[in-house]
Amino acid sequence: MNFHFLILLTLLSISLSCTGQTNKSFEEEKIEVKKGSDQSVLMDADQLFGDRWNSLPQPLFWKEIMTLSPDSCLVNVAASRQILVRMAWKDWAKQTEIQKTLFKDSLKVANGIASTEAIYVTTGKNDFYKFKDVYPQLSKGVAAFEKYGVDPWYAQAILLIESPGQLKKSTVGAYGAFQLMPSVARSHGLKVDKYIDERANFDRCAYGAACVLSKVCIPEAKRILNAKNIAFQENELWFRLFVLHVYHAGSMNVRAVVDKINPTAGSQDLIKQMWQNSAAGFGNNSQNYTQLALASQLILHDIVYSQCDEIFECYPN
């Protein structure tokens, strides 16, 4: 067989191996953004405003945290992320444990908060969420996911919150722009050993993440919802956030928390209930994951509409 023909077949098999149902609405959600000579294609944030996700206290809390320096902190109600006090971290840290407890108790009384509610002190994290650094990757991620027939909204969402603009390995071994675990990357064709780690390559990591979503996360999300007879549309924001929970926490943990909630319909309310409930391995970090996703999309929207010269909607051919 001709050598060039073999290469063509190989490339074709790679491009099709993670292809899901091509959703024509992808094109309708894209915007073309120009800033000087730079041009990017991103996913719009219209759904954030249509269903008023942008007014929920949790994403607003994380939006502030993501843009706040580490020398500042927000004292907040754990369950609702209601911000009670903004203060310098040094002023909080210099207190004794007894003083901290008394301070929290005084805030509960002053704000009519039940004594059983947990109060968190969360430092700013703008040293981690480097949106200007990750911005150039977003258009590449959108194009890569669309190439593989996977909703490009996920590429943008994941890139914004998974080690944005940085090539760092997590404490559990996740690595690359899409933070893939070694075993997950290998199971989807990436080479990861002591000599080569293809997760460091943006295109290969995007391919692996697209495979994970199309072969595992989206099908598992559908199975969980179908088991509860919950209807869904794949381009609805609540469904996309539900899939992100599967991507982050795993289907077994998401199934556990859904069984605990026992919802009868899919909506923003289901996602909000997931933020308030824990089960199996679905805990605080899992609850926060889609709150971070919403917050980062709001920040991206602000960046685009405050700093870009021209913005065009993209339409299907």
Image (tube, rainbow, N blue to C red):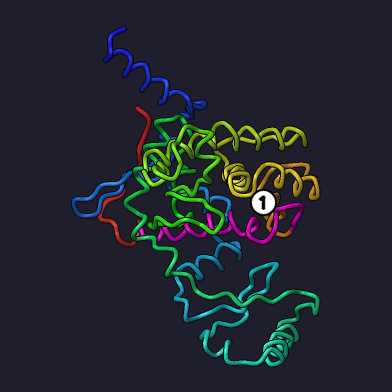
Res 213 → quadrant: top right
Residue 277 in the figure: left or right of residue 205: right
The residue positioned farthest toward the top in the image shown: 1
- Does 74 sit above or below residue 169? below
- Does 82 sit above or below residue 131? below
**Percent of width and height locating residue 222:** 66, 34
Quarter containing the N terminus: top left
Question: What amino acid type is highlighted by mark number 1?
Answer: Ile
State the SS at label 1: helix
Highlighted range, magenta: 277-303
**Percent of width and height locating residue 210:** 48, 36
Main secondary-structure element of the magenta-colored stretch: helix
Residue 122 in the figure: left or right of residue 102: left
Quarter containing the C terminus: top left
Residue 66 lies in the magenta-colored region: no
Residue 280 lies in the magenta-colored region: yes
Residue ID at (72%, 37%) = 224
